[in-house]
Amino acid sequence: NSTDTLMKIFLTGVTGQVGFELQRSLSLWGEVLAPTRHELDLSDMSAVSHWLEIHAPECIINAAAYTAVDKAETDLQTTLCINQDLPCVLAQYAARHAIRLFHYSTDYVYDGSGQDFRSEEAPTGPLNAYGRSKLAGDQAIMDSGASYIIFRTSWIYAARGNNFLKTMLRLAGQRDHLSIVADQIGAPTSARLLADVTNIALARRDVPSGVYHAVCRGETSWHGFACQIFETARRMGYELRLQNDAVQAITTEAYGAPAPRPLNSRLSVEKLEKTLGIRLPHWQDALSLTMAELAFSPLQ
Ligand SMILES: NC(=O)c1ccc[n+]([C@@H]2O[C@H](COP(=O)([O-])OP(=O)(O)OC[C@H]3O[C@@H](n4cnc5c(N)ncnc54)[C@H](OP(=O)(O)O)[C@@H]3O)[C@@H](O)[C@H]2O)c1
């Protein structure tokens, strides 16, 4: 019976980059309950518990998070509430009702030392409040006894929402030169790709509980990412005020953001590729697709 596969999914963070892409792709599964902030305040744990009891979802996908990395340093209470308490409550519900929880975590749970690609078994050591809160969320899920999948990802961008890609395109239209950090190395990852990966993992019900790195292949710096954005934009016919060769490479220290960032965010994706039988695209290919989508969104 084909309706046996239909599932009631509770999706959080639907107005975010990943949440929006998930809502689109999850619709094939049956019913997607995706309340906005106005419908359900995720910092209110009794409201969240009440929502769960009333709606009785058969799967939870938690794409909500407190993602303002610098603000998190001083806004600790809200950060911990959304990044630690919320996943804990969701995981406890999932454990009690024997349903699966999908969750997203970050390269910022690692300390960024060395030059190598990290595996999921590498020791954690977050450098900032955001990373510590995300690690605490991961730990709460692992300790809950729930069936879970945690995707650790990095440098997310999308055609929609606030992100580095859109900031760069805006600045390139306003300024004739820019200074971009060149000593943090990682992989830009599109929100669309994460939604696709989540759907595959959802369809494969035998994927073992665990942490999986989910990022694009390849590596670059924020400076390299920016240069690729500008090159692609020029090729697509964007008119940039920014001059060719006017993107200065600077250090993390010189940029001076309030929260420290890991320098090495290289994450190995071998475990995810083997488990799901997939090959993740190179970050440049995923970027081209999102930029092609942006080019047809004049209202954004
Ligand atoms: N962005 C990155 O570069 C990055 C990198 C690595 C990992 N991650 C992880 O990937 C996941 C998805 O990130 P993203 O970039 O898609 O996040 P995002 O665009 O910042 O979206 C966050 C979502 O959480 C919602 N939210 C936050 N507080 C809420 C509250 N009190 N009540 C209701 N909703 C609330 C937001 O709602 P509003 O729109 O109403 O604020 C929004 O829908 C997160 O787990 C994040 O930690 C992100």
Image: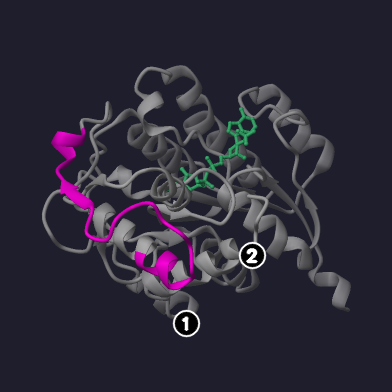
How many marks overall?
2
- Tag 2 secondary structure: loop
Left or right: where 227 falls relative to 71: left
Q: Residues within 10 Å of mark 1 (few under 14, many from 20)?
A: few
> Is 248 rendered above or below residue 37?
below
Residue at 22% in and 59% down: 245
Q: In the image, is residue 285 part of the stretch drawn in magenta?
A: no
Estimate the x, y position of residue 133 in percent, counting from the top left. Answer: 39, 32
Q: Residues within 10 Å of mark 2 (few under 14, many from 20)?
A: few
Residue at 21% in and 35% down: 255
Residue type (three-letter) at the residue carrying disc 1: Gly
The residue that label 2 is drawn on is 296
Query: For this rendering, which residue is in front, 234 or 76?
Result: 234
Estimate the x, y position of residue 262 in percent, counting from the top left. Answer: 22, 44
Left or right: where 61 falls relative to 76: right
Query: For this rendering, which residue is in front, 180 or 267?
Result: 180
Q: Viewer-nearest of labels 1 and 2? A: 2
The residue that label 1 is drawn on is 277
Q: In the image, is residue 251 part of the stretch drawn in magenta?
A: yes
Seen as rendered, the residue at the extreme left is: 114
Residue type (three-letter) at the residue carrying disc 2: Phe
> Is 185 rendered above or below residue 45?
below
Left or right: where 120 falls relative to 174: left
| Distance CA(mark 1)–CA(mark 2) | 32 Å
Estimate the x, y position of residue 216 in percent, counting from the top left. Answer: 39, 67
In which quadrant of this rendering is ligand 1 seen? top right
Q: Which residues are magenta?
A: 231-255
